[in-house]
Image (spheres, rainbow, N blue to C red):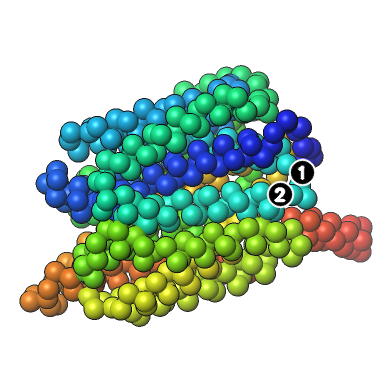
Amino acid sequence: MNLQIQVKKPKSMAFILMLGAFIGLFGETALNMALSNIMEQFSIKAATAQWLTTGYLLVLAILVPVSALLMKWFTTRQLVVGGIIISLLGAILAAVSPSFAILLAGRLVQAIGTGLLLPVMTSVLLVIFPIHKRGVVMGLMGLVITLAPALGPTLSGVIISTLGWHYIFWISAVFYVLLSVFALAIIANVSEITKPKIDSLSILLSTIGFGGLIFALATMAEEAFSSAKVWLPLLAGIIALVFFCTRQLKMAQPMVNLRVFKYPMFTLGTVMMFLGILVILSTAILLPLYLKGALLFSAAVAGLLLLPGNAVNVILSPIVGALFDKWGPRLFVILGSIIVVIGNVIFVSVISAATPAWQIIAAFMVLFFGLTMVMMPSQTNALNQLPRELYGDGSAAMNTLNQVAGAAGTAIAISLFTAGQSSFVTDVPDASQGEILAAGVKYAFYFMTGISILGFICSLFVKKPGQVVKEQSAASAVKTTDPVHLQ
C-alpha cells in the first residue's frame, strides 16, 4: 500500500524539488511589497495591481488539477525540467517588462511552471522516502509551502530598496538556470506512465470553474456584487464546478480522482490546509500595504519587520516534523489552531495608524507559530490515509484547493480592505490617509479571525488514519453482533 521507490539520490531530488517549489511560491507574494511602486510606475489602482498576485494564483488553480493527468503522460524528469524552464522564461519576461500588461504576462507564464512543479514535488516525496521518515520530509515541505509566500515580502522588500523590483525576477532567473542544470543530472523518473485518455471537457469545465470563481472574487475589489462582472463569472464558475465534479465521479479514469475525498482525514486535512493558506496569503498582501502605507516604513524595513515571524516558521517546522512521527497530528493542530486565533485577535486589537512596530512583530510571530503547527501535520496526516495509487490524485486535489485558497484569500482581503476604507471614510470624512488605510486592513483581519475560528473547530475532529480504521472496524464489529442485525 505504501511502498517506497528506490532512487540513487533521494535527498538531492528532494532538495531540487523543494527549491524549485520555494522559488515559485516565493513568487506568489514577492511583488506584494512592490505593489505601491508598481502602482505609481504604471499609474494603476490597488484593485488592478493585485492581479499580479491573484492572476498568478489563478493560473495555479487552473493548472494544478491538470497536473494529475500530466503526471500520467510525462516522466518526472520531463515535468520538473519543463516546469523550471517555463518558470525561467516567465521570470525573464517579467524582468524586462516595459508595461503592466507584459509584467502580468510574465507572471502568468512563471505560474505555469510553478503549477507543474508543485504536484510533482508532493507525489515524488511521498514515494522516495519510507513512511517512518515522512514526518521529517513533509515537515520540510510544509516549511516550503508556508515560508515561501510568507518570506516573499521580507526578501523582496530588501531587494526593492537596494536594487529595484525588476531584480526580484532576475535573481529568480539565476536560480532557475542552476536548478535546470542539476535537475537534468539528478531527477529520476518515479511516475508510472499510463497515458490515459485526455478528457477535453473536464479540462474546460475545470478552467471555467476555478477561473470564474477566482475572477469574480478578485473583481469584487472594484465592482459591486450586483455587477455582471462579478455575479456572471461567479455563477458560471459554480455551475462548471458542479458539472466537473459530477463528471469526475462518473468517469473510469477521471482527470482528478475526487474519490480521495471519501477518506475522512484526507478531506479534513485538506480543509485545514485550505484555511491556513487563505490566512497566509491574506496576511502576505495586507501587511506590506499597512506597514508602508499606514506606518510609513520603507520597503526594506517593512520586510525586515516580518522576518522574526518567518524565523519562527523556519525553526519550528523541522521540530514539528520530527515530533509528528512520535506524537501524531492531533495535539499540534488543536494547539496550533488556538494560537492562530490568538494571533488574529491581536492584529484586530492593535492595528491603527500609530501602532508600535513591536506589536506587529509580536502578532506576526504568534500567528506563524500557530500556522506552522497546523500546516504540516494537517497535510501529512491527510496524505498518509491515502493508498499509494492515489498519491498523485490526492496531491493534485490538495494543491488545487491550496491555490484556490491563496487566490481567494488575496482577492477577498483586497475586497474587504477596500470596503473597510470606504466605510471608514463615510464615518470619519476628515481622517488621514494612514488612518483610512489602517482601518481597511483592520476590517480585513476581522474576516481572518473568523476563518481561524473555523479552523479551530475543524481541528477538534483530527485523528490518525490508523485510529479512524480502528474505530470503523469496531463500529462494524458492534453492528454485526447486534441482535437486531443478526435477526
At 77% across and 43% down in the image, what residue appears? Answer: 130
Above or below: residue 337 compared with residue 428: above
Above or below: residue 98 compared with residue 285: above
Q: Element type at marker 1? A: loop
Residue farthest toward the left in the current orientation of the protein: 430
Residue contact between numbered discs 1 and 2, judged by CB atoms under 8 Å: yes
Query: Looking at the image, can residue 108 be seen?
Result: no
Question: Looking at numbered disc 2 in the image, what kind of residue is underneath it?
Answer: Arg
Question: Splitting the image into 4 quarters, where does residue 70 fall?
Answer: top right
* In this rendering, position of residue 317 left or right of residue 134: left
Q: How many numbered discs?
A: 2
Question: Looking at numbered disc 1 in the image, what kind of residue is underneath it?
Answer: Pro
Instruction: From the image, tell me which residue sits under label 2.
Output: 134
At 45% across and 33% down in the image, what residue appears? Answer: 176
Above or below: residue 287 compared with residue 168: below
Query: Quick one: label 1, few (<14), some, or many (20+) residues within 10 Å?
Result: some
